[in-house]
């Protein structure tokens, strides 16, 4: 299975990072019918996501966004495009904050 790993550093702090992770999850759910489950913690916030063809986790801390995902066979053919789009989406969210 093709895997994605995208990381972005930030200086937002955990509360703002958590807010952005929640916004990212809502956007993914609305646009791609991805099911997201939130796992809040004191030092990090995780969004576990899945739908047919993809599953993964977005982990945010006070300093970093880290997305890890596994793509199914069909979506694996579009790995580069998916990786670019997710990266642009995270960059946009971080730029707006």
Image (cartoon, helix red, strand yellow):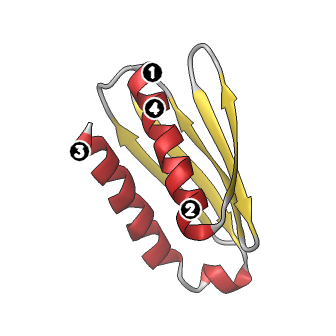
The mark that comes first in sequence, 1 or 3, is 1
Residue 59 falls in which quadrant of the image?
top right
The mark that comes first in sequence, 4 or 3, is 4
Residue 86: x percent and y percent?
44, 61
**Closer to the camera, 29 or 49?**
29
Q: Is residue 77 left or right of residue 56?
A: left
Tell me the element at label 2: helix
Residue 30: x percent and y percent?
56, 62
State the residue position of label 4: 19
State how far apart marks 1 and 4 are (Cα): 9 Å
State the residue position of label 1: 14
The mark that comes first in sequence, 3 or 2, is 2
Q: For mark 4, does the 10 Å Cα neighbourhood hold few (<14), some (14 to 19), or many (20 or more) residues?
A: few
Q: Is residue 62 in sight in this rendering?
A: no
The mark that comes first in sequence, 1 or 2, is 1
State how far apart marks 3 and 2 are (Cα): 21 Å
Q: Residue furthest left?
A: 95
State the residue position of label 3: 95
Tell me the element at label 4: helix
- Residue at image position (43%, 38%) is 20
Q: Are marks 1 and 4 in contact (CB under 8 Å)?
A: no
Q: Are marks 4 and 3 in contact (CB under 8 Å)?
A: no
State the residue position of label 2: 30
The mark that comes first in sequence, 1 or 4, is 1
- Residue at image position (33%, 61%) is 88
Q: Residue furthest top?
A: 42
Q: Residue furthest right?
A: 52
């Amino acid at each position: 299975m093709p895997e994605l790993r995208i990381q972005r550093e930030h200086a937002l702090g955990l509360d703002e990072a958590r807010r952005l992770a929640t916004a990212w999850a809502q956007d993914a759910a609305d646009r791609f019918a991805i099911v997201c489950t939130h796992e809040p913690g004191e030092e990090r916030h995780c969004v576990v996501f899945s739908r047919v063809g993809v599953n993964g986790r977005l982990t945010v801390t006070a300093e970093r966004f880290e997305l890890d995902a596994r793509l199914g066979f069909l979506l694996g053919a579009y790995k580069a495009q998916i990786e670019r789009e997710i990266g642009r989406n995270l960059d946009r969210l971080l730029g707006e904050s």
